[in-house]
Amino acid sequence: MKTILFIIQKEFKQIFRDKSMLRLIFILPIIQLLVLSNAATFDVKNIRVTIADYNNSSSSRALIEKFKANPYFSEVENVSHTQEGIERLNKGKTDVVIEIPNQFEKQLQNDTTTQIQVLINAIDGATAGVQNVYITQIVQLFNQNIRVENQQVSNEQLVPNRIETIPSFWYNNTLNYKTFMVPGILVLLVTMLTLFLSAMNIVREKELGTLEQINVTPIKKHQFIIGKLFPFWVLGLVILTVGLFIAKVVFSVPMLGNIALVYLFTSVYLLLILGFGLFISNHTETQQQAMFIAWFFMVIFLLMSGLFTPIESMPKWAQNITLLNPIRYFVEFIRMVLLKGAGLQEVLPNLGIIAFFAFVVNGLSVWSYKKTN
């Protein structure tokens, strides 16, 4: 036990002696959490619309006012011809071109079908889809109001029935996207930092030549591994603590569940990530190699974690691959606990899977570490 404590003490001294390492550990995660949480959003706002109104009637002007009054549309420009709007679309000066036909108001009053043409810049398919939904909702609501007015004019006694929905938003009643993103980004930062540091730690000893000296000492394999990785396990929990504090104070993320459960899960999760970092370092000779390999797996884990794209929207083969992704289970867990207030029983499957992964990965890592006396 004393041997392990001496190694841990040596590692902490080495970490705090390296000023660049301190900045990497404590300052960068804070900056990244603050920046990424504000930048990583799928909300589509500031939509620029160009409208070619061939009708110039009270009805067409009323429809245009609906777009101007909507907060998601930042610019609503009128042009005399659709071709002008298309030219603006080609030059990137607008996102949507809407053409209102010449017989627009007359067809509405006669209760016949009328159509408006909508041209959307669909280079970003996801954004275009959201823009189309916004426009469709505005047009449908406008159409509904026109029908009500026409029916009341034709028969004052007729009061058409209208169905209204009253939504109740659970777990995120303000629809704040940061509430959804901040916990996931915190998982990302904890994973990245502990994986990269653990992957490069032993490789750094190889480059300096100190690993060969340690290998010929009476220090046992498990003592060396525990002593090398334990400081980064502690630092991972420290980063989690700082991240939770920022999430609560800066972003007002609700924390409905048991925080102790978050630390329990993170403690097991860090064993998995540190073991994976050790496995990488066992099979690399330089820090550059370790960084490239760690980043290769990190990109795959990130893109298939459900953090930015729903797993349910992925192809079936991709969904099966995500079952091996540890970040997926941590993202699901932290959102369930913080936002839904889930207890141990609800998150036990995630905890069991991570514990199993940690056992397997650490077993392979210890087995692959070669120490010669």
Image (tube, helix red, strand yellow):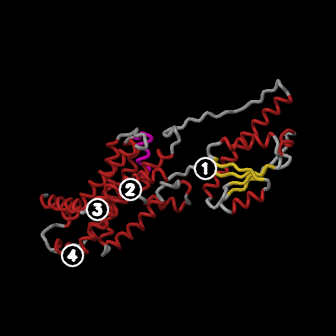
The N terminus, quarter of image: bottom left
Label 2: how many residues lie within 10 Å, few (<14), some (14-19) or many (20+)?
A: many
User: Which residue is drawn at the image coordinates 44% and 42% (left, top)?
Assistant: 339
Report how far apart the C-alphas of labels 3 and 2 lie in the structure. 15 Å
Residue indicated by mark 2 = 189
The residue indicated by pointer 3 is: 21
Image position, residue 336 (x, y; %)? 43, 44
Q: Mark 3 and 1 residues: CB-CB less than 8 Å, in contact? A: no
Name the amino acid type tagged 3.
Answer: Met
- Whether residues under marks 4 and 2 lie with C-beta atoms below 8 angstroms apart, the answer is no
Q: In terms of sequence position, does the residue under pointer 4 or pointer 1 come before the other?
A: 1
Q: Which residues are magenta?
A: 331-342
* Mark 4–mark 1 distance (CA, rounded to whole Å): 56 Å
Between 262 and 240, the residue placed more toward the observer is 240
Q: Which residue is mark 1?
A: 46
User: Which residue corresponds to the image point at 26% horizontal and 75% vertical from the top-left?
Assistant: 207
Question: Are the residues at dot 4 and dot 1 in contact (C-beta closer than 8 Å)?
Answer: no
Return the residue at label 4: 209
* Element on which disc 4 rests: loop
